[in-house]
Amino acid sequence: MNPMRRPLLAALAGIAGLGTAGALALWPDEGLLNPCLAPQAERWRADPLVRAALDGLDPAALWDVHAHLLPVGTAIHLHGPWPWPVMYAQARLQDNAACVAPEATDPVRAFLGPLVERLAAMPPGARVMLLAMDDFYDERGRIKPERTHFSVSNDTCAAAVRIWPDRFAWAASVHPHRGDALEELARVRGLGARALKWIPQAQGIDPASPRCDAIYRALAASGLPLITHGGDERATAGDDALGNPLRLRRALDAGVKVIVAHCATMGHGADLDRGPNAPARPNFTYFERLMADDRYRDRLFGDLSAIPQRARSGPVLATLLERGAVGGDWQRRLLYGSDHPIPGAMPLFSVRELASQGYLADADVDTLRTLRRHNAWLFDLVLKRRLRHRGRGFAPDVFATRRVLEPRAS
C-alpha cells in the first residue's frame, strides 16, 4: 500500500464515520480527490436542473445553517488527539474538498475564496453560516491543546463576515467551562453571531450538566439558537456518549432553541430516559422522541448536513424526506445545511447509489456528478432539492432557514 494511502483511508474513515474497511469500500465510485474545476457560475445558473432546484425558494430566506471555516496551511493544528499522519491527511483532504490553492498564504481567504466564487451561481441574498469552534476545556476551565482536534476563533469568523457580508453569517463557539463564558457570549452577540455552536463529543461538553445552565439562560433570553452535533461524531476525536440527543433535554427545558446537527443520524446510545444502563438504541430514535414532545415543538430543529452521505443514507433518509415534505410534521423543523466543505470530499457521496436506492431520478445523475466537480456547495443544495421518497421531497420551508436564526432584540 502507498505510504500515504493508509492515513488517507483513516482520515476518510473519520470524516465518513466508517472503519478503514468502510473507507476502502468508498474508494472507487467518484474518486479520491476533488478536481475543483472552474466554477462556471453563468453556466450553472442557466442549467435546467439548477433552475428547477431553485424555483420556489426565496434566496433571502436561504441560509445554510451548517458550514465550516477550517484551518488551512500554517494554521492547521497537527498535534491533536489523533496520530500525526491521520491529522495531516484529514487536513489535506479538507483543503482539497474546499478547493484551497496549494500556494495560499491567507488562511481565511484561502478557505473561503473558492466558496465565494461558487456562491456567485446563487441569487443575491443567500448566505452560508460559518461555524466557530472553541478549544477543549477540562472541568477546571483549563484549555487542553492535546485534546483539541481543531479550533477556529470567534474573531476569525466575525472577520470573515466583515469581508463578505453579503454571503456569510456566523455562529460563535463558547465552551461552558470557560471562566469568561457569559462575557464571551455577550461579546460575540455584539459582534453579530447568529447562533452558538458546539461539538460536545470533541470539546468535552456534557449538554446535560448543570455547568451549562448559565449559558442556557443567556441563550433563552437572547433567542440565539444552539447548534450542537447529535449522535456519534467521527470527523473529530471525542466521547460519543456526549452526543446522545437525550442530553439536550436540559437545554430544551430551559427554553433554548436547539438545532441538532445531522439529526443525530449516526450511532447508538443509552436510553437515558430509562437510566444510564438502559440498552443502547439508535440515536435517531431519541431525536424522533424529542421531536414528538409537544413542549419542544417551537424550539427543537434538525439540520440536514451530511444526511445523503453514504454512511448515513438509507431508511433514515426516507423518514426525513417523508416528514420534511409539504404537509409533513417536520416541514418547518428540518433546516438546510451543507456541512461545507464535506460535499467536496469525493468518496463520501455517491449519486449513483442514491439513484439505485430510488432517491434520485436516473436522469439527474450525470448532471449532478458534473456539477459536483465544478461547485460542490451548489451540488449539495441541488441534490437535497432533488431527493425523493415515494414521490415526496423536502418542502421549500426546509430551505427557508433564516427565520430560525433571527435573535431577539437586545
Image (cartoon, rainbow, N blue to C red):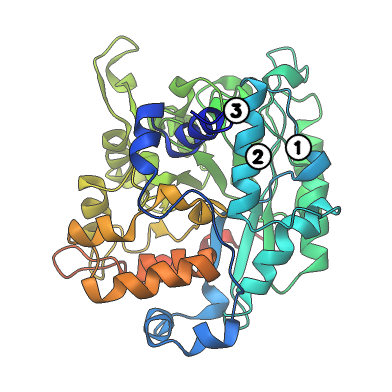
Mark 1 and mark 2: span between their CA atoms?
Answer: 7 Å
In the image, what residue type sits under mark 2? Answer: Ala
> What numbered label is drawn on residue 76?
1
Q: Which secondary structure, mark 3? A: helix
Mark 1 crowdedness (10 Å alpha carbons): few <14, some 14-19, many ≥20 = some
Q: Residue at x 29, y 65 (%)?
A: 387
Circle nearer the N terminus (3, 1): 1
Residue wearing tag 2: 91
Q: Position of residue 215 (x, y in %)?
A: 65, 34
Residue wearing tag 3: 86
Mark 3 and mark 1: span between their CA atoms?
Answer: 13 Å
Compare residues 223 and 173 and report the one nearer the observer: 173
In the image, what residue type sits under mark 3? Answer: Val
Snapshot quadrant of residue 36: bottom right
Circle nearer the N terminus (1, 2): 1
> What numbered label is drawn on residue 319?
none
Give the number of the mark in front: 3 or 1.
3
Snapshot quadrant of residue 209: top right
Mark 3 and mark 2: span between their CA atoms?
Answer: 8 Å
Verify CB contact (< 8 Å) between mark 1 and mark 2: yes
Q: Which secondary structure, mark 1? A: loop
Compare residues 66 and 32 and report the one nearer the observer: 32
Point out the residue furthest to the bottom here.
Answer: 46
